[in-house]
Amino acid sequence: MQIVDRGVVFAGRPETECASACFPGVCAMPGGRWLVTLRVAPTKQAVLPQRTLLTWSDDRGRTWSGVTEPWQAPELGDRRGGFRAAHVTPLGGDRLLAVLYWVDVTDPSLPFFNEETEGLADSRIFLSRSDDAGATWSEPWLARTRPYDMPTPITGPMLLLGSGEWALQFETNKTYYDESPWRHESVLVFSQDEGRTWPEHACVAADPAGRVFYWDQRPSVLPDGRVLDLFWTFDREQAEYRNIHARLSTDHGRSWGGIWDTGVPGQPAPAVGLPDGRLAMVYVDRSGAPQIKLRVSSDGGRTWPEETESLVYGFDAGTQSRPKGSMQDAWAEMGRFSVGLPATAPLPNGELLVAYYAGPDTDLTSIEWATAGTS
């Protein structure tokens, strides 16, 4: 594949509350509208102020609507919340569904991640619908993710399964002051009534020994209905990243086959099925200066040959990775990244749409887009 076009969705604004633009989500509607969500803040690590915004383009990225803040985070009991991220799924026609990541910001002096305990600020998942292509949205409602009553960061948009069900994706973290060992899981919960109830769940990936973290799961529903999940894989004993790993479900996410090493270093976006039956994977390679790359698989995601690689974005400075000795070092390193988190969506013409954040400095980043197609 090769890059067809590229542009900027939203440019970070130095020395403002919108200097740091990151955590993008991307959605392509059948009628041609592209929607991008993003989080803005004065710095990447800021707890307040932070806002989750929405913009769209009806002309393949040439122009973008003014950014709006369509979702206001409700209070939960006596706790003040803010939305840290959003991902949008097309439901057909002009209908859309947003998955919203609510975070407790009652005490903005507390960092998002507690380095002493490895706990996370309390976080929950809300949903919101639009029936007019994103112009207006419903009041967000809480998704009950029991038995996972702990911080549940979202890892991407709602999946529309071949069975007709919805699958909500997230990963598990500890509560902020919990000193017990962190038992990480990548999880799907399932709804048969369009998000009103979530009676079933499946653990997609977890290491019983607690050594390997299958972080940032990136599941996608393939054209034949199977679900392929990709993982940013961290070995906490060695305090280093392994290659991207993958796992496949043939029963709509209820059970999963063996996990495999893709042979590709980095942090993936969801795989996208191409018209010719191959799969495309966009990922961040931080083995040197951070780059966003694309590879193609002809065997269902088992291998991604290096000769299929193309460059989506290159950063011309030095590496942003550092030697790590602990989980705390890994989180501190994440906080320094100024390139990352690509999100992908298939386009009606068979091309691939990518959105990602990038910039010259940790606290000055923009949201950019690119399209890729077969040569």
Image (cartoon, grey):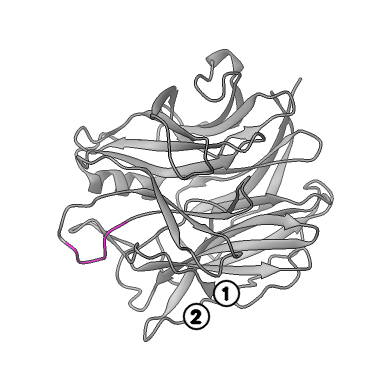
Q: Are marks 2 and 1 in contact (CB under 8 Å)?
A: yes
The residue lying furthest to the top in this view is 307
SS under mark 1: loop
Mark 1 surroundings: few (<14), some (14-19) or many (≥20) residues within 10 A: some
Front residue of this view, candidates 214 and 242: 214
Q: Position of residue 82 (x, y in %)?
A: 47, 72
Q: Which residue is mark 2?
A: 74
**What residue lies at 53% left-to-right and 64% top-to-bottom?**
100
The verdict on residue 176 being magenta is: yes
Q: Is residue 202 left or right of residue 192?
A: left
| Residue 20 shows in this picture | yes
**Which mark is on residue 140?**
1
**What residue lies at 47% left-to-right and 51% top-to-bottom?**
155
**What residue lies at 67% left-to-right and 35% top-to-bottom?**
223
Q: Is residue 18 above or below residue 288?
A: below
Q: Is residue 336 above or below residue 199?
A: above
Residue 345 occupies quadrant: top right
**What residue lies at 44% left-to-right and 76% top-to-bottom?**
81
Q: Position of residue 135 (x, y in %)?
A: 76, 69
The verdict on residue 199 being magenta is: no
| Residue 317 shows in this picture | no
What residue span does the magenta drawing correspond to? 173-178
The image shows a total of numbered marks equal to: 2
Name the amino acid, label 1: Pro
The residue lying furthest to the bottom in this view is 78
Q: Is residue 223 left or right of residue 46?
A: right
Front residue of this view, candidates 231 and 55: 231
Magenta stretch prevailing secondary structure: loop
